[in-house]
Amino acid sequence: MSMRIFRWKAIAPLILVLLLLAAAWMIFADTFIRHSAEDQGTLTLGTEVDIATLTTHLSSSAVVLGGLEIADPFDSTKNLVEAGRIELQLEAVPLLEKKIVIDRMVLGGMRFGTRRRRVAHPVKGPSAARTILQETRDWAKQFDVPLLHLTPIETLKSLVLNPGQLQTVKAAEALTATADSARQAFETDLKDVHVEPIADSAAALGSRLKGATPQSLGLQGAREAIAAIQRTLDQIKQTRDQVNGLERSFGAGVGVLGQGLTALDDARLKDYAFARGLLKLPSFDAPDIGTALFGKASIDPFQQALYYAQLAEKYIPPGLQPWRQSGPRRLRMAGTTVRFPKEREYPTFLLRQGSLDFSIGHDSGGSSFAATVSGLTNQPALYGRPARLQAKGRIGGASPMSVQVAGVLDHLGKISRDSVQASVTGVPIPSFDLPGLPFGLTPGHGDVGFNFAMNGDRLNGRWSVHAAQATFTADSARIPQLSLIENTVWRVLSGIHSLDLSAGLSGTIREPRLSIQSNIDEEIAARLKAIAGEELAKGEARARAAVDKLVDEKVAPVKARVAQVQADITQRIAAEKARLDDAQRQLEAQLKTLAGPAGGLLNLPKIRLP
Amino acid sequence: MLALLKLIQSIFSTLNSEGTPGQVAAGIALGACLGLTPLVNVHNLVVFALIFVLNVSFGGGMLGWAVFTPIGFLLDPLFDRLGMALLDSAALRSLWTAWYNTPVLPYTNFNNSVVLGSVVAWLLLVIPIFFGARSAVTVYRERWGARVMESKWYKSVTASKAYNVYRWFRPE
């Protein structure tokens, strides 16, 4: 009996199953795609992405999203951006290759910085964006500037230092150990050179041949004596070479000890600063005041720009090399998904042209705003052009604003170049408290400028704020309790009615530099120095005295010991070299005596004197 | 519960009487793909359709799926390595690039290390699984099959109504 290969009666159920699957897809596809888009967006951006509705229109290859909310990764209570409606016009053919090419995108009803109805959930599981977010936060922490402590220095507290807290004491102890080990090593090495046995052997040979002449020794005896002298002279030469080597190596060691002494002085300066910090003496230099007052507010915009630039760096790699990313989340292991880009093919994601319709706050009309995004892709090498963002316009309402934004993501070459320039005039600037002080600043409406560029790992940025009607506020309950210094600062601040702030970022990602200037730094610095300069000097003198008292008793013996070691090594080497020189001179004199008159007869080999 | 009952029914029916040992083994070999590789992928839709359409034991397919699912989870790290080695291979780069830029193929997720590694591993193992399963079914039927079929437990399971649904897919 022949067996049939196909089970024909199963075809109908199979078709039924496939139809059911197709029907399920048609019913649930939008929900499935919406959840996938939310998950992928959340994973990519490192912050919660919510989409209220998503409708696909297969016939026109269009997708319409409603109620997009992207939480602010730096503040989970706020939305970075909201979009009421997003229309995406997709190309159909690339979809067959699992690629998304958006010909046209229209975003409407956009709002920024709105408060969320609920706090955003943190991203679960491994996420490159979350790692970058944490790295950026760590990066910003290096700018955690000390607060502007305005301790009432007229009542400086007493200073009690523990020697263990001082770097100079630790450095002195380390230097003592270094000096001792250098001396010990020198003694050992010098012993290994065997200067004494060689010198003694030379002296013994000299004594034995004292008064000897070729005639008294005879021809054979003279030859043997000359040979013995030459051997000893060779040994002396080798020993001197070794001593010279010791001199060179320990000369360097002596130099290190000298550097150690210099380092003690540097450590003492740090200890002065440490003691000064314990006294909480305020710095009255203008740059320090500017940094202390506005450091945190200034680093925030740079931190955010760096985060998005690094995200772009991560997701928009240069070149056409295969690109790896973590596989999809599932019960099974996610694995790694590798993309294989190919020239003249579609990138996996491309937004050719997008237009944005903004509405910020309660727009009551009078707005004219145009914004476009073009060439945004995750494989710029395939697209061949950098991504650009342009936005310009006026936003009406009770307090009209004018906005200009331009940005470029250029990842075509090996080194990516990202930049953004933005200026907003008439923008309401949020109030904030001055760190460490019982004062606040209400800038009111003002102009804000922001430039940021990342070229490879080089950073260049500027953030500026001009508020013509800024007011400083103080907690009225605390005003009667203000110290002299705080009171002075308050008198300065309360007389200032504008704010001009400029923060600059430069350097590299690893070694960034932040500089801050404002119109109130110099004024506060001058007033504080005038009032508190004398008290400050007294406080500094007290800090120095406290450090000196502990450090001097530790450092003086170390300096003496280092000097002693340096002198000992120098003297010992000189003494050993002199000893070898004496032995050599004595033997050379004897050699002259023995070889001189009979030189021609004895046919002596050439002697190379050192 | 119904699904579980059906699974138990299918396993014992398969082992005892349905189809030749070769048909059961072929079902197990195909079902192994469902278990060894991540389920929600296009290739598994094809394998599932083959189990439906080909005159192999459907119960064998379900048995293979059930048996090889935990094995698949256990071997995922191995599949990941195998898949990554293949995806990283310079000799295969042009093939992957061509596939990646060919319509529909990217939906197979062949460029995922676990998917590729597990599918390749299944392709390598499918013949040994077939012969191994065929021998095991033959031995089972010779030594224990008759006793199991006579047991009350087996009779009560096969008497269930759900069993009738399953019977549609018995090998002929």
Image: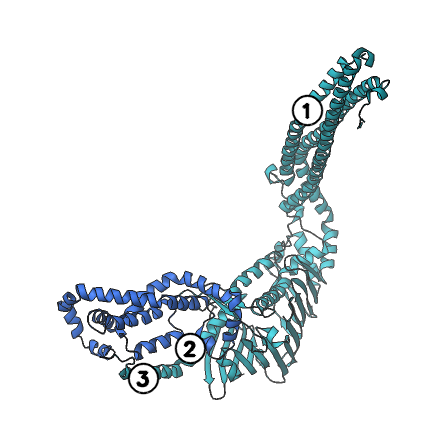
Mark 3 vs mark 1: give the one in front.
1
- Return the residue nearer the eye: A499 or B85: B85
Q: Amino acid at mark 1?
A: His
Horizontal and vertical percent for residue A248?
73, 34
Colour chosen for chain A: cyan
Callout 1: helix, strand or loop? loop
Q: Earlier in the sequence, mark 3 or mark 2?
A: 3
Evaluate if marks 3 and 2 touch, with contact meaning CB atoms under 8 Å apart.
Answer: no
Callout 3: helix, strand or loop? helix
Q: For the point 65% across and 49% down, which residue is it?
A: A152
Residue tagged by mark 3?
A: A16
Mark 2 vs mark 1: give the one in front.
1
Q: Quadrant of the C terminus of chain B?
A: bottom left
Q: Amino acid at mark 2?
A: Phe
Q: Mark 3 vs mark 1: tell me if same chain.
A: yes
Circle 1 crowding by C-alpha within 10 Å: few under 14, some 14–19, many from 20: few
Q: Earlier in the sequence, mark 3 or mark 1?
A: 3
A92 with respect to A499 (left or right): left
Q: Amino acid at mark 3?
A: Leu
Q: Mark 2 vs mark 1: tell me if same chain.
A: yes
Residue tagged by mark 2?
A: A32
Disc 1 is attached to a residue of which chain? A
Residue tagged by mark 1?
A: A194
Evaluate if marks 2 and 1 touch, with contact meaning CB atoms under 8 Å apart.
Answer: no
C-alpha span from label 2 to label 1: 87 Å
B158 with respect to A191 (left or right): left
Letter of the blue chain: B
